Amino acid sequence: MDDGPEIIFDDIGSYPLPAGMSREKLPEGDSYLGLVKDAMVQKIEAGVERPTYPQFRDMIRMFMDPIEDPKRSESPYLVRAGEARILELEALEALGRRRGGVGEQLSARVCVTGPVELYISRFGATDYRDILDNLAKSVGRFVEMAKKSRHFEVAVVSIDEPSLGISPNVVFDYDDIKKALEIAARPCGGTDCEVHLHSPLMAELCAGVPGINVIGVESAANPDYLRLVDRKVLEENGAFLRVGIARTDIDGMVARLNDRLETNLWLDPERLKREVFSAESADLMEKRLAAAFQLFGDRVRYAGPDCGLGPWPSQTMAKDCLARCARAISSFNSRPRPEG
């Protein structure tokens, strides 16, 4: 048995809006920041140790809008350093000030959409390397600005690259991708820097990128993904894993439950909640974490749900999912570790 360091509970980011609200018509100003702060409080209350600001806005536009604005950029696709601000972090600053008054420091995970993801959203299957480099520098500037936050700690930076290993529009060679990710990650310094992937096919490449030391793998819905990652490659590069232990593909889960139960759970929210959490119990989440640890041992540093909870039916249900993850991780951390 190996006691090892404790697994840290984080989340990916996206979260449901309050009932009756639409992502197409979000409030502005203080009202919007209030939504962000309320969601962060829910995540903290659920037990998330490194909560990510809720991604209520589009993950591309929230970064590309300032990058493409001539008044906020210094050259094509290179945002000015002083303009590389993430609006949602203002809510975290306010929350950090409030918590600081009672001696509690807010430690957060800050996610920035990665340079390859931003590139293919505008240019598809092309290879304008100078633009990719500028986007990578822009991502780095968002990271650098985030780390200047005064009232909360940026404990983890995540560079989100869900299309790597999946999209045929990614035509850059490995060296170009590694260079872009290295540029984006450079400002992380001594902060844990994760690359968030939806496919494990690029995990080993990302593990070799200087500045990136955590690889996120969506392993709850697809546990076999973990077997596509070589533990030796992680060890050789000093890299760790962030593993998914709770499924978040709510549409797929409910579709299968509807087939099995011969009903439409979407018409009965209370039963939907019971059936989903009957299938996705804290015990099952803990077993998934134990299985990941069996494969990778102390290379597992973070755990939480798979990709974000934005599509879930309600904030209450999303918070419940997070709370079950918290119980699973706490229980795992309290036990003697299986040999990994």
Image (tube, rainbow, N blue to C red):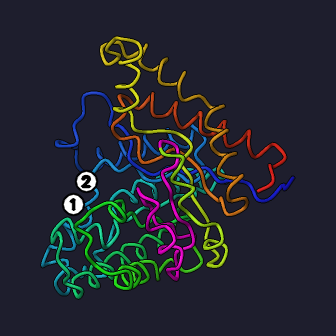
Are discs 2 and 1 less than 8 Å apart at CB? yes
Residue 19 drawn above or below residue 218: above
Magenta span:
192-221
* Residue type marked 2: Asp
Query: Which residue is more in the foreground, 179 or 102?
Result: 179
Q: Secondary structure at mark 2?
A: loop
Tell me residue 297's x, y (percent): 72, 59
Say which residue appears at 68% left-offset and 53% top-offset. 7
Q: Secondary structure at mark 1?
A: helix
Residue 45 drawn above or below residue 122: above
Query: Which residue is more in the foreground, 2 or 223?
Result: 223
Q: In which quadrant of the rendered view does residue 121 lie?
A: bottom left
In the image, is residue 194 part of the stretch drawn in magenta? yes
User: In the figure, is residue 1 to the left or right of 294?
Assistant: right
Q: Which mark is residue 61?
A: 1
Residue 84 drawn above or below residue 186: above
Query: Which residue is more in the foreground, 197 or 173?
Result: 173
Residue 229 drawn above or below residue 289: below
Q: Residue furthest left?
A: 70
Say which residue appears at 39% left-offset and 38% top-offset. 249
Tell me residue 338's x, y (percent): 80, 49
Disc 2 from disc 1: Cα separation: 5 Å
In the image, is residue 231 part of the stretch drawn in magenta? no
Residue neighbourhood size for the residue with mark 2, other residues' Cα within 10 Å, grouped as few (<14), some (14–19), many (≥20): few
Instruction: Name the residue that disc number 2 marks.
Output: 58
Say which residue appears at 38% left-offset and 47% top-offset. 14
